[in-house]
Amino acid sequence: MAEPIRLFVSSSPDLEAEREVVGQVVAGLPIRLGWEIRHTPKPGEALAPALEAVEAAHLYVFILGMDYAAPMGLEWGRAVRARKRTLVFVKEVPHSPAAALWLSEHGAKVERIAFDSLAAFRHAFERHLIQALLDLAETLRLHLDEIEGLAARMKALEEAALQAPAVARGADRSAIILGER
């Protein structure tokens, strides 16, 4: 039996909805191989299995929300040392001092994908995950029909993005709007 695609997701506790999206996107991809998705352990869970899972992963996904919480730093360091294929997503929210420090230290060194909503995260995550899978197709031993299915899904995502109306931003904040005189 072929080995599953191993994905490790490093994130803080405030990103539960984004972790759910990761599972939904993965489940919807046209791939026959199984998946093994591991996440940052919750407080009280053992750390060693998570760090081993980072080293065994084909893809390492780092999602930064409001906070940069332990043991994300250990996971990040392990992924960098192991030279893992990494996808970095940063939620556009006020960041804690720890998250701001991580961004100032690493932000310019890595390609990061910004998102401001769950829908934006879903779209960006799916697009970048598909591209990573296509890049790793030989390593993962994907079949031609799986590669074609991923390419078709990528094309559909790009077409949907082109057809999406522009979204105005900033109207959700307090404001004073002056009328004409």
Image: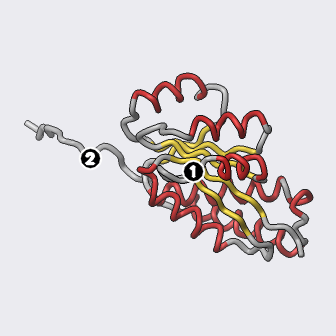
Q: Is residue 165 in view from this perspective?
A: no
Q: Name the residue under label 2.
A: 171
Secondary structure at badge 1 equals loop
The disc label shown at residue 40, or none: 1
- Contact, mark 2 vs mark 1 (Cβ under 8 Å): no
Whole-percent x, y for residue 61 in the image: 64, 49
Compared to 130, does 78 lie above or below?
above
Q: Which residue is drawn at the image coordinates 58% and 62% (left, top)?
A: 22
Amino acid at pointer 2? Ala
Split into 4 quadrants, where in the image is the C terminus?
Answer: top left
User: In the picture, residue 3 is in which quadrant?
Assistant: bottom right
Compared to 30, does 48 lie above or below?
above
Split into 4 quadrants, where in the image is the N terminus?
Answer: bottom right
Secondary structure at badge 2 equals loop
Q: As rendered, which of 126 and 105 lies closer to the eye?
A: 105
Q: As rendered, which of 180 and 115 lies closer to the eye?
A: 115
Whole-percent x, y for residue 175 in the image: 17, 39
Report whether 116 appears left or right of 130.
left
Q: Which of marks 2 and 1 is nearer the N terminus?
A: 1
Q: Which residue is drawn at the image coordinates 60% and 45% (left, top)?
A: 62
Whole-percent x, y for residue 94 in the image: 36, 36
Q: Say how the picture is coloured.
A: secondary structure
Report whether 75 appears left or right of 172.
right
Amino acid at pointer 1? Thr
Q: Distance between the residues labelled 2 and 1?
A: 35 Å
| Label 1 crowd bin: few (<14), some (14–19), many (20+), radius 10 Å | many
Q: As rendered, which of 159 and 14 lies closer to the eye?
A: 14
Q: Which residue is drawn at the image coordinates 76% and 67% (left, top)?
A: 150
Compared to 88, does 44 lie above or below?
below
Q: How many labels does the image show?
A: 2
| Label 2 crowd bin: few (<14), some (14–19), many (20+), radius 10 Å | few
